[in-house]
């Protein structure tokens, strides 16, 4: 099946942290930055034909009905009820936005807003209401090796994704007439200034967040900036693995939340090695929320 140009744009659900560290003392005053496009003219026609605009929800944030429909308690139920003081307003997901009872109304609102798609999740404790308690952490190390482990975990995740896609295409796609893809999370990054270094920093920031996954999916290897800065700590796909990962999707979903300024920060090399600073980019979200 040819790769679809369909993309999914998620606007709700969890807020993901930037994959770097902000050091305010290292950030210079904001200066005027030339926009990369005229946002006043931005509309649906600015996107490729077939682009799907949608929204997404996460079960605990949306569902409510915590004790209905055969649902068992989840770890979030236990945490929010046992330690309400840990929640800013002492609330829980027992009711949330009551999507369980009001999903028809919610979907109607999405239709009214001209959404094309809706991605939702179902609480695992509805599917497995009597889940067993695992043994907990397999190590007492509370920090881990942030210079290697995130890269290894992501590498294995990409390989697992590609293997699942291959299996689906071989075993089920023809009979189900389905499509299979992957959803990635990315912020947009704007150069902190018009300097060449900050423009390059914005590109690196995108490489380290979006390109980390998207580049292997389209080329079979990691972005050049990651290979250069992370070096031997970054795993390498074998020829067989690269062939498996490359093109392992019929569609790409994008969960987009916000934008950030990106400034060149070579001084961050003193804080590493860590995936949090390997990009040598400093971020600030001041005046960048879209």
Image (cartoon, rainbow, N blue to C red):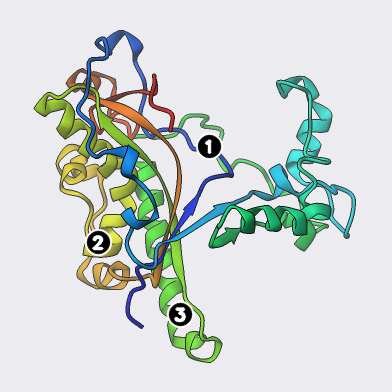
Quarter holding residue 76 = top right
Task: Identify the mark nearer the N-term, 2 or 1.
Answer: 1
Q: Which residue is drawn at 64% across and 49% down?
A: 58
**Residue 15: image tag:** 1
For label 3, the residue is 167
Side of 91 where 13 appears, left or right: left
Quarter holding residue 42 = top left
Disc 2/disc 1 C-alpha distance (Å): 30 Å
Q: Which residue is drawn at 80% across and 37% down?
A: 78
Q: Residues within 10 Å of mark 2 (few under 14, many from 20)?
A: some
Task: Return the residue nearer the eye: 276 or 61.
Answer: 61
Q: Which residue is drawn at 18% across and 37% down?
A: 229
Secondary structure of residue under mark 1 = loop
**Mark 2 and 1 residues: CB-CB less than 8 Å, in contact?**
no
Task: Identify the mark nearer the N-term, 1 or 3.
Answer: 1
Disc 2/disc 3 C-alpha distance (Å): 19 Å
**Residue 237: image tag:** 2
Task: Look at the image and tell me in which quarter the N terminus lies.
Answer: bottom left
Secondary structure of residue under mark 3 = helix
Disc 1/disc 3 C-alpha distance (Å): 31 Å
Q: In the rendered view, would you say 4 is above or below 21?
A: below
**Residue 202: image tag:** none
Task: Identify the mark nearer the N-term, 2 or 3.
Answer: 3
């Amino acid at each position: 099946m040819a790769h679809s140009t369909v993309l999914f744009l998620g606007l709700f659900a969890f807020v993901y942290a930037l994959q770097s560290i902000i050091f305010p003392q290292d950030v210079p005053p904001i200066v005027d930055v030339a926009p990369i496009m005229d946002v006043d003219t931005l509309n649906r026609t600015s996107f490729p034909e077939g682009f799907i605009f949608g929204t997404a929800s996460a079960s605990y944030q949306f569902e409510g009905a915590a004790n209905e429909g055969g649902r068992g308690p989840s770890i979030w139920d236990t945490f929010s009820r046992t330690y309400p003081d840990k929640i800013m307003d002492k609330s829980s997901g027992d009711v949330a936005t009551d999507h369980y009872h009001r999903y028809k109304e919610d979907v109607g609102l999405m239709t009214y807003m001209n959404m094309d798609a809706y991605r939702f999740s179902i609480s695992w404790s509805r599917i497995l209401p009597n889940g067993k308690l695992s043994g907990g952490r397999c190590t007492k190390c509370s920090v881990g090796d942030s210079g290697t482990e995130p890269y290894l975990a992501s590498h294995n995740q990409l390989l697992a994704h590609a293997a699942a896609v291959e299996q689906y295409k071989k075993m089920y796609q023809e009979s189900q007439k389905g499509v299979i893809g992957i959803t990635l999370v990315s912020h947009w990054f704007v150069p902190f200034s018009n300097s060449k270094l900050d423009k390059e920093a914005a590109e690196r920031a995108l490489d380290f967040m979006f390109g980390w996954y998207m580049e292997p999916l389209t080329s079979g290897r990691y972005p050049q900036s990651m290979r250069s800065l992370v070096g031997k700590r970054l795993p390498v796909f074998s020829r067989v693995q690269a062939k498996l990962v490359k093109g392992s999707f019929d569609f790409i979903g994008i969960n987009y939340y916000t934008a950030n300024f990106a400034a060149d920060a070579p001084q961050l090399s003193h804080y590493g090695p860590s995936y949090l600073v390997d990009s040598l980019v400093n971020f600030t979200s001041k005046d960048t929320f879209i």
